[in-house]
Amino acid sequence: MKSRQLLGLACSVCLLVIPGAGGTLPWDKDMQDQPNMKPQDSVIETNPTTVPVGGKDQFPPPKDIIELVRARLEAGRTLVNPIAKSPESLARGREMYELHCLVCHGEQGRGNGPVGQKFVPQPMELNFDYVQLQPDGQIFYTISHGSIAMPFYRQAIAPEDRWHLVNFIKEVFGET
């Protein structure tokens, strides 16, 4: 009888000393122990026969930096801005800039926005000749597909609004 009491006492002590040993079932940590994947870790393959809401992009997303540079140059040669510069276009471009670009490129387009200051390298200064001398199609492509450190906006900004944004960047930051 004494050995049974000792065994019972030992089991009780073990249950108290080892937290969770007595109160959990073996599968209680399944959700914690499973492999996980963050959304940005995976690439979502799209069906090539689908058409985006705003129409099909002339240039598919680049697969690497070399393809990005080549496609950007090609876009500069082939894409023509269908939106004429006008007060309405510049106003819409300003709205898009303030909503999507200002946090990185800053109010004056100098790459010193509150978020952009945290990046290495810092965002491009939009008043540089490097940007201002680019054809509209090349800037449109960069907005659409991003750059080395810049994210893409093809899913966040409608194509027409990207052209308004190009007009705004060339008109407002080209003056400085």
Image (cartoon, helix red, strand yellow):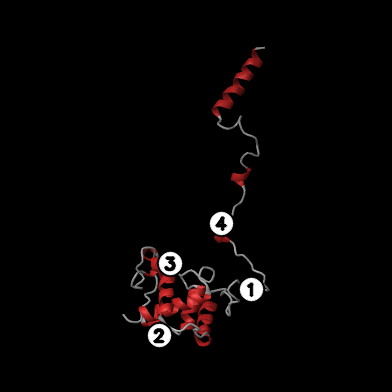
Q: Which residue is mark 1?
A: 51
Q: Amino acid at mark 2?
A: Leu
Residue 146: x %, y % from top left: 49, 72
Secondary structure beneath label 1: loop
Q: Nearer the viewer, mark 2 or mark 4?
A: 2
Q: Nearer the viewer, residue 56 or 127?
A: 56
Q: Which residue is mark 2?
A: 133
167 up-or-down from 114: above or below: below
Secondary structure beneath label 4: loop
Q: Residues within 10 Å of mark 1 (few under 14, many from 20)?
A: few
Q: Amino acid at mark 4?
A: Lys
Residue sticking out furthest to the left: 176
Residue 10: x %, y % from top left: 60, 21
Q: Residues within 10 Å of mark 3 (few under 14, many from 20)?
A: few
Q: Residues within 10 Å of mark 2 (few under 14, many from 20)?
A: few
Q: Residue at x 36, y 69 (%)?
A: 106
Taking 107 as reference, is 57 left or right? right
Residue sticking out furthest to the bottom: 77
Q: Which residue is mark 4?
A: 38
Q: Nearer the viewer, mark 4 or mark 1?
A: 1
Q: Nearer the viewer, residue 157 or 90?
A: 90
Q: Nearer the viewer, residue 167 or 148?
A: 167
Residue 19: x %, y % from top left: 55, 31
Q: Amino acid at mark 1?
A: Val
Dot placed on the residue nearer the N-terminal end, 2 or 1? 1
Do the residues bearing badges 2 and 1 touch, measured as CB atoms within 8 Å? no
Dot placed on the residue nearer the N-terminal end, 2 or 4? 4
Q: Which residue is mark 3?
A: 99
